[in-house]
Image: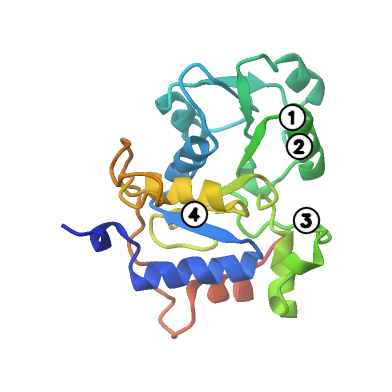
Amino acid sequence: MTLATFLPDIEVAAYEAELTEHLGVDHVVAVSSGTTALHCALYAVGVQPGDEVLMPALSVVMAAAPVHHLGATPVFVDCTPDGRDFDYHDLAAKVTDRTTVMLPVYLWGRAGDENLARSFAADRGLALVTDACQALGTTNESPTIADPSMQPASPAVRRLTNQVGIRADIGCFSTHRLKLLSTGEGGFLTTNDPYLADQARAYRSHWQTADSGQMPMSRLAHNFRLEAPANDGGGVGVTTWMWGRHGRR
């Protein structure tokens, strides 16, 4: 068995690169499901046993399960009446000295106020991990990435920098067969932080791809790798196919 056994194959690497371009982010890490994307993301931001993770009461077990598996406690927060967002009064009341992560969950393609979430998390020193597994293709009304250097040159690509979830420290997405972009089973996470990307990549492959400062397999991790996704049969990349046919707000 060699290191190549644990590296993404050429098709998966190309798929990650295509998603990176289309979403206007620095890093995409493809994994075996939306749930494993969340698991990798929470591990990458440093969730440990005893931590508390704030998440909406209107959620799904797939979002809470990775929190539990890492030994942390999901703390459920009241939602706004329409279910889109946290009730920020209740959210503030539930922050403790054990709170480390804020985890919005975007159900049915509906997202909360991402600027407010970023501000709340930053003010309290919390990591922001977004579960956008049901919101791939949902966009904000206008571009929200302020730094022009982060905007891709192509107008067709520029449109997709409005994707909800990508402004978090890590955004998590599903590509299950029922999603707009399908790899059969699968998911991916996005981040602009190279350290978080490296942590997630190592965690998805039994820590075999650890950075140069660590020994391979020096930590316990998982096999959360994605098998090579098929394209739509017309020679067009899977992300091009999705964005060309299924974009939504």
Residue type indicated by callout 1 = Phe
The residue tagged 1 is: 86
Where is the N terminus found, in terms of image quarters?
Answer: bottom left
| Left or right: residue 149 compared with residue 13 | right
Label 1 with label 4: CB-CB less than 8 Å: no
| Left or right: residue 125 compared with residue 67 | right
How far separated are the C-alphas under marks 3 and 1?
18 Å
Where is the C terminus found, in terms of image quarters?
Answer: bottom right
Compared to residue 77, the image places residue 158 above or below, namely: below
SS at badge 1 = loop
The residue tagged 2 is: 117
First along the sequence among labels 3 and 1? 1
Label 4 with label 2: CB-CB less than 8 Å: no
How far separated are the C-alphas under marks 1 and 2?
9 Å
First along the sequence among labels 1 and 4? 1
Mark 1 crowd level (few <14, some 14–19, many ≥20, 10 Å Cα):
many
How far separated are the C-alphas under marks 3 and 4?
20 Å
Instruction: Identify the mark at residue 140; answer none if there is no mark.
Output: 3
Q: How are the residues colored?
A: rainbow
Q: Position of residue 8 (x, y in %)?
A: 35, 63
The residue most toward the left is: 1
Instruction: Identify the mark at residue 188; answer none if there is no mark.
Output: 4
SS at badge 2 = helix
Question: Which is closer to the viewer, label 1 or label 4?
Answer: 4
| Left or right: residue 249 compared with residue 105 | right
Of residue 187 and residue 216, the one placed in the foreground of this image is 216
Q: Residue at x 71, y 63 (%)?
A: 161
Label 1 with label 2: CB-CB less than 8 Å: yes
Mark 3 crowd level (few <14, some 14–19, many ≥20, 10 Å Cα):
some
